[in-house]
Amino acid sequence: MSNDPLLQPYQLKHLTLRNRIIVTAHEPAYPEDGLPKERYRAYTVERAKGGVAMTMTAGSAAVSKDSPPVFNNLLAYKDEIVPWIREMTDAVHEEGAAIMIQLTHLGRRTRWDKGEWLPVVAPSHHREASHRAFPKKIEDWDIERIIKDFADAAERMKAGGMDGVELEAYGHLIDQFASPLTNELDGPYGGSLDNRMRFCFDVLKAIRARVGDDFILGVRYTADECLPGGTGKEEGLEISKRLKQSGLIDYLNVIRGHIDTDAGLTDVIPIQGMANSPHLDFAGEIRAATNFPTFHAAKIPDVATARHAIASGKVDMVGMTRAHMTDPHIVRKIIEKREEDIRPCVGANYCLDRIYQGGAAYCIHNAATGRELTMPHSIAKADRRKKVVVIGAGPAGLEAARVAGERGHEVVVFEAANDPGGQIRLTAQSERRREMISIIDWRMSQCEKLGVTFHFNSWAEAGTVQAENPDVVIIATGGLPHTEVLSKGNELVVSAWDIISGDVKPGTNVLIFDDAGDHAGLQAAEFIAKAGGKVEIMTPDRSFAPEVMAMNLVPYMRSLQKLDVTFTVTYRLEAVEKSGNELVAHVGSDYGGIAKQRTFDQIVINHGTIPLDDLYFELKPASSNLGEVLHDQLIAGRPQTAWRNADGKFQLFRIGDAIAARNTHAAIYDALRLVKDI
């Protein structure tokens, strides 16, 4: 048996867990009609195949109809969920993993205009900032009904074969009762800690009465809200001890912080540029104080940190949840002593930010996650070896090269720059986004193992490519900043890339016109402001940086607000002209009726990229498919068979920003779904 602390089994009551790594409860937003159908099951089972000890699914599965999900959660109040749960649990158990589900009532952490349009309930009328609903103060009959709903839902989950259920307390109704900030009730459920904890214990007792003792029951709860007037550390320790002493639960899953604002949520679940494992020591304090099984997860992205968490005795089970969205086979690779092959989580938080914006969870650089029914995590060998030439070593090109290499093809990559990375190498110039470079480093490492040939400092021309006698050519040349968006004065502006790269010195009084709304605009603003410049970010949109999304926006705002950056929405930069040593900005509005003039010494444009596609169009006449992609074949996962030119010697495709300005995930998905069938 291995001496690796992570690979030691753990006995949780009657349940033997095969190692110490879990996927904590999360909702990837894949349900259909609130049910875990084929897509949901495939996603969950893939992590079990990868060797995880236990997967906790369905973050915040709703137990009541007045707890409508604000994103696509499972609906545990539906009787018809049971057979779908059974299919999923059976499949996970067949792979040797345990499976639990998380149940909740959201309380005020939802909206009244979702689901059945029922009033939101909470132990006070205080609105949660994130979801904006003013709740009804909960009544006695609401409490009775919701306690029964919890017990009913737990009984359904046991009938579906789950090994246990976890109550989602933190930020949700159970913690809203427990926190003095959100509980203004009188009588048995308000006031003293005994009273504020009563709802939690009543729910636990009702569940235990239904499911018996041979069913794991745990609580994910806040042991320190980190808010003035809220549940503090001392009271959190007391809550932890009372949960253990109740005899009703089998483990604690510890959280520190609050999630009622975007900033609070991001501190609980940190993103790239923030410290790894910031709450691990705190979880260790809870375990030491209670001597009770303790679970914890919060930005533990790498095996070394997870190993330390277990070896040091801070926790009994360590959650690597986002890490398993990036690579579901972490445990298998540890067992096989291939830790260097683990695809690294870079903390980009594309997964969670998409969920909180109403989309499905996708990993920024594993396009198979959430698409297990159509996209492979392991690439199959091709029937025939081909020569594949890739132009460009950004994320799209490197993914194409990696997948082609895994297919067994001979792969040659041409890159005009000294180093790989493309726009990722640029974005990684910012300290907060430095982890992004691992997307490139991992692919380069994999390509080197696969024997991919690289030519750097090589500007590929049509003759260069054709001299390779390729079977397939993939253009992944990306794009260049698109700054020619003004009616006049385009030659007077610079791009956000110019600032980030250091090619242009920051000005002292700067306007950034950002209608792309992605990271580059905010990164440029931060570079300029840190250099001492006065910065205004202007956008014609009604909100700024919408592509950055909520949790990624938090660190930017903390920095930019301290630097006194100004944000101006709903105004459009229309033209620029020079006046002496200054630039005059002509500003209008899409809403009409506005014409202003403002003066700056530097104007920066962030308007995405324009494809760098000259080589594609040079090669197109010599290709057999004339560049055509048959969308039905691409979507169905079949090889491309377009044949438009009998004299063509090779298939020609382009991917990523060489087609149109999009994002890193789109570029990698382009490459994976095309090349996996070549």
Image: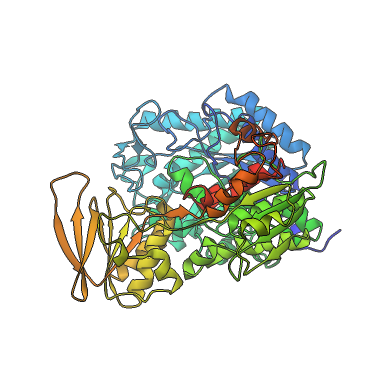
Horizontal arrangement in the rendering, residue 117 relative to residue 163 (left or right): left
Instruction: Decide which of 315, 81 is in the foreground and name it.
Output: 81
The residue sitting at the front extreme is: 647
**Res. 80 image quadrant:** top right
Q: Which residue is drawn at the image coordinates 31% and 43% (left, top)? A: 132
Q: In the displayed structure, would residue 624 be above or below residue 485?
A: above
Q: Which residue is drawn at the image coordinates 65% and 27% (left, top)? A: 159
Kindly tell me whether residue 274 is visible in this rendering. Answer: no
Q: In the image, residue 289 lies at what x, y percent? A: 58, 63
Quadrant assignment for the C terminus: top right
Instruction: Decide which of 549, 123 is in the foreground and name it.
Output: 549
Quadrant assignment for the N terminus: bottom right
Q: In the image, residue 63 lies at what x, y percent? A: 49, 32
**Res. 647 image quadrant:** top right
Q: In the image, residue 151 lies at what x, y percent? A: 54, 31
Q: In the displayed structure, would residue 168 be above or below residue 295?
A: above
The residue sitting at the right extreme is: 1
Instruction: Decide which of 74, 585 is in the foreground and name it.
Output: 585
Instruction: Decide which of 17, 422 is in the foreground and name it.
Output: 422
Q: Which residue is drawn at the image coordinates 61% and 40% (left, top)? A: 626
Horizontal arrangement in the rendering, residue 288 relative to residue 482 (left or right): right
Q: In the image, residue 47 lies at what x, y percent? A: 69, 45
**Res. 591 image quadrant:** top left
